Amino acid sequence: MKIQMVDLKSQYNHIKNEVNEAILNVIEHGQFIKGPDVKIFEEKLKSYLNVKHVIACANGTDALQIAMMALNLKPGDEIIVPVFTYIATAEVIGLLGLKPILVDVEPDTFCIDVAKIEDVISPNTKAIVPVHLFGQCANMDDIMDLAKKHRLFVIEDTAQAIGSKYTFQNGTVVSSGCIGDIGTTSFFPSKNLGCYGDGGALFTNDDALAEKLRMICNHGQKVQYVHDIIGVNSRLDTMQAAILNVKLGQLRNYENSRNQAAKWYDELLCGLDWLEIPKRRANSTHVFHQYTVKIKTGKLKRDAIRVEMGKLGIPTMIYYPIPLHQQKAFDTENYPLGSFPVSEALCDVVLSLPIHTEMNYEMVQEIVRNLIQVHQELK
Ligand SMILES: *Cc1c(COP(=O)(O)O)cnc(C)c1O
């Protein structure tokens, strides 16, 4: 029994005929860029998410950049991001000459702590970028209220949570990425909806924004060779779209498989006093891009567990080992160690266990058995 963080090969084996046919079809029709499969994918994803516009692009980082380019921001404008996230979220802010304003996260959901946002809002603040980390939504009720109050844009980074649903206090249910002004996602192979290369997309319910996003993706043009704004070249290629059309048909099944694995983990891990299982927010579904536990016995133990598990052939990952304010690429002087105690503490104790669409009970059992044994032996 081979245990992997993700098992794309076994997943492919179940959809092999359809995927192969889709790829061959693209080679036959030959429209490798802007082919019909891209439009079909955008339409399918629109109805899956129940959103007005889906604009495919080259990757999730581009999607974030393009979203920010569409908001008429000027150098020095500030954008609020969680300090515990993947680099891409904050990187594009710096790239555009904007200023990332970092905010700590909730210790149990790993998502931005809304109670700490208002303190850092200034006259230059223009947007909030909640990241729906590991597969469940941030506290969108309070984020949307705050954004309305301070007239801020909301760009949701749902690269890890596509398909998750948020239930607002008034009962409205909305797919992640379709709540704020713009949502962005990634189709990187290991993401919940992954292609066989790079891919990404933007979501919006705003017609004018949709038109602008589409223009930016396409060199700032609406009519060929007429360039009204500065854009970029960011396209989902047709073959990736064809693959995604097959995989989108499986996304709900994939979500269920991941939830089943998470439930097995919960059952086998919930009694341990040295470990904390991931918390589910009551008003969001979870699509378990990652199953991330906290090793309460601390960093040395956590790191040793990783090494020992690795020797036994069981991979684990640390998402993320260093919070953004401690990354040299950013202005670390403004944020000394201790600035974001929750995120700093999380980086020392989080451990992501293998979770993917092809897991069975025996695999989860095997992982948990080894985890407990390794921890025991390290005592
Ligand atoms: C994967 C990811 C991205 C970037 O996606 P790419 O397609 O790799 O550019 C952005 N944000 C988060 C939270 C991610 O997990």
Image (cartoon, rainbow, N blue to C red):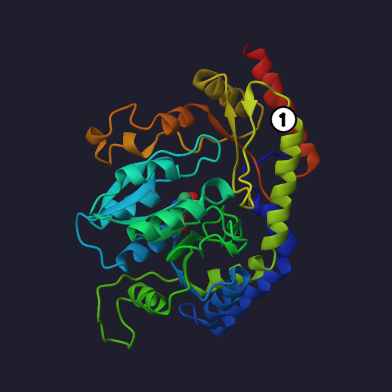
Residue that numbered label 1 is attached to? 270
Query: Residue 81 at what x, y percent from top left?
Result: 37, 48
Q: Residue furthest bottom?
A: 223
The structure residue drawn at horizontal position 66% and vertical position 44%, both measured from the top left corner, is 355
The disc labelled 1 sits on which kind of residue?
Cys
Query: Residue 8 at what x, y percent from top left?
Result: 64, 53
Query: Residue 221 at what x, y percent from top left?
Result: 31, 82
Q: Quadrant of the C terminus?
A: top right
Viewer-nearest residue: 66 or 207: 207
Query: Residue 19 at what x, y percent from top left?
Result: 66, 69
From this viewpoint, is residue 220 visible? yes
| Relative height, residue 202 to residue 103 (above, below) | below
Q: Quadrant of the N terminus?
A: top right
From this viewpoint, is residue 358 visible? no
The structure residue drawn at horizontal position 25% and vertical position 81%, both measured from the top left corner, is 228
On screen, residue 39 versus residue 70, left or right, reads: right
